[in-house]
Amino acid sequence: MSASLANKARAEPNLTPILDMVFQLITFFMLVINFKANMMDKAMELPIVGSARPIDKEDRRAFFMVNLNNKGKFTVFGKALDDDRIPGYIANQALVYKLQEHRIHPDFDQAKDELPTTVIIRADRATPFSKVYRVIKECQDNGFRNFAFRAMNKAKGA
């Protein structure tokens, strides 16, 4: 009787469709995830400006997000950078955007042309202007020319 069980074909599941589906799900989530949304420091209290407008959802230009907390510290992904590391960080980001622009437009001169990337500055309402100006100046020195400032239209809870 045991000999007859050994001769029968064994039924094994075919894992190929399951693995294919898993890889497709991984690819889907990697394409959908928005890493730039994590650049915003949500603990900030933005200044209140009555003429503030919401972000244009149709605008597909590249952007570089800058956060300055209430102490004037430059924050990246929620962590404050030391003041001496800010120029290097901005220079590295500028290089990334220059290489990206050169890849899209081969005639882009990385040394002369200004970057079409918009620098979005999110500064807490208690941030001293001298800190904001320093970041703007550093960005300009690295080829950024387009700036946008984020503000609230009305106070929270109002």
Image (tube, rainbow, N blue to C red):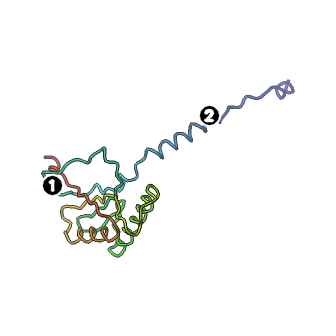
Q: Quadrant of residue 57?
A: top left
Residue 118 vs 28, above or below: the answer is: below
Image coords of residue 47 (percent x, y): 17, 57
Tell which residue pokes out farthest to the front in this image.
107
Residue 146 vs 30, above or below: the answer is: below
Image coords of residue 142 (percent x, y): 35, 69
Q: CA distance from mark 2 to mark 1?
A: 54 Å
Image coords of residue 139 (percent x, y): 31, 67
Q: Which mark is residue 48?
A: 1
Along the line of sight, the residue nearer the viewer: 105 or 52: 105
Amino acid at pointer 2: Pro
Q: Which residue is mark 2?
A: 17
Secondary structure state at the residue bearing disc 2 = helix
Kindly identify the residue that appears in the image at 35 percent across and 76 percent down.
84
Tell which residue pokes out farthest to the bottom in this image.
84
Amino acid at pointer 1: Ile
Graded by Cα atoms within 10 Å as few (under 14), some (14 to 19) or many (20 or more), the crowding at tag 2 reads few
**Is 135 on the left or on the right of 94, as rendered?**
left
Residues at circles 2 and 1 in contact by the CB criterion of under 8 Å: no
Of the numbered discs 2 and 1, the one sitting upstream in the chain is: 2
**Is 78 on the left or on the right of 2, as rendered?**
left
Along the line of sight, the residue nearer the viewer: 109 or 14: 109
Image coords of residue 43 (percent x, y): 27, 56
Kindly identify the residue that appears in the image at 18 percent across and 61 percent down.
125
Secondary structure state at the residue bearing disc 1 = loop
Q: Quadrant of residue 108?
A: bottom left
Question: Which image quarter is the N terminus in?
Answer: top right
